[in-house]
């Protein structure tokens, strides 16, 4: 009985993972502008001029 419940749990998790990987490709349809946005985080006020 215990092995069967482990098997069902493993199959359920495998199905969930496979579904999430498969469906993650179905995006919102937002077009990519081709630009990459980079956010710089600097906590030293004396280094602001360098950036």
Image (cartoon, rainbow, N blue to C red):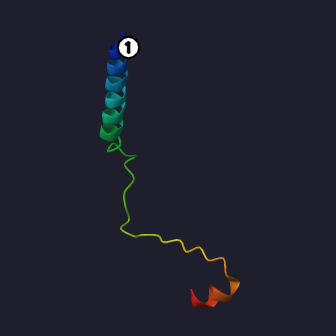
Which residue: 34% across, 42% down? 26
| Residue 24 percent across, percent down from the top left | 35, 43
- Compared with 50, 44 (above or below) is above
Point out residue 22 in the picture as x, y percentages from the top left corner: 30, 38
In terms of image quadrants, where is residue 48? bottom right
Figure check: 3 above or below 21: above
Q: Residue furthest right?
A: 45
Looking at the figure, which quarter contains the C terminus? Answer: bottom right
The vertical placement of 14 against 25, above or below, is above
Estimate the x, y position of residue 3 in percent, counting from the top left.
33, 16
Judge by depth and name the residue closer to the eye, 17 or 40. 17
Q: Residue at x 34, y 18 (%)?
A: 8
Query: Relative to 39, does residue 11 appear above or below in the rendering?
Result: above
Quarter in which the N terminus is drawn: top left
Q: Which of the two residues, 2 or 39, is positioned nearer the viewer here?
A: 2
Which quarter of the picture shows residue 33?
bottom left
The residue labelled by disc 1 is 2
């Amino acid at each position: 009985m215990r092995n069967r419940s482990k098997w069902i749990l493993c199959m359920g998790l495998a199905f969930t993972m496979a579904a999430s990987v498969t469906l993650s490709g179905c995006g919102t349809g937002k077009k990519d502008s081709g630009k990459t946005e980079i956010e710089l985080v600097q906590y030293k006020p004396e280094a602001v001029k360098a950036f």
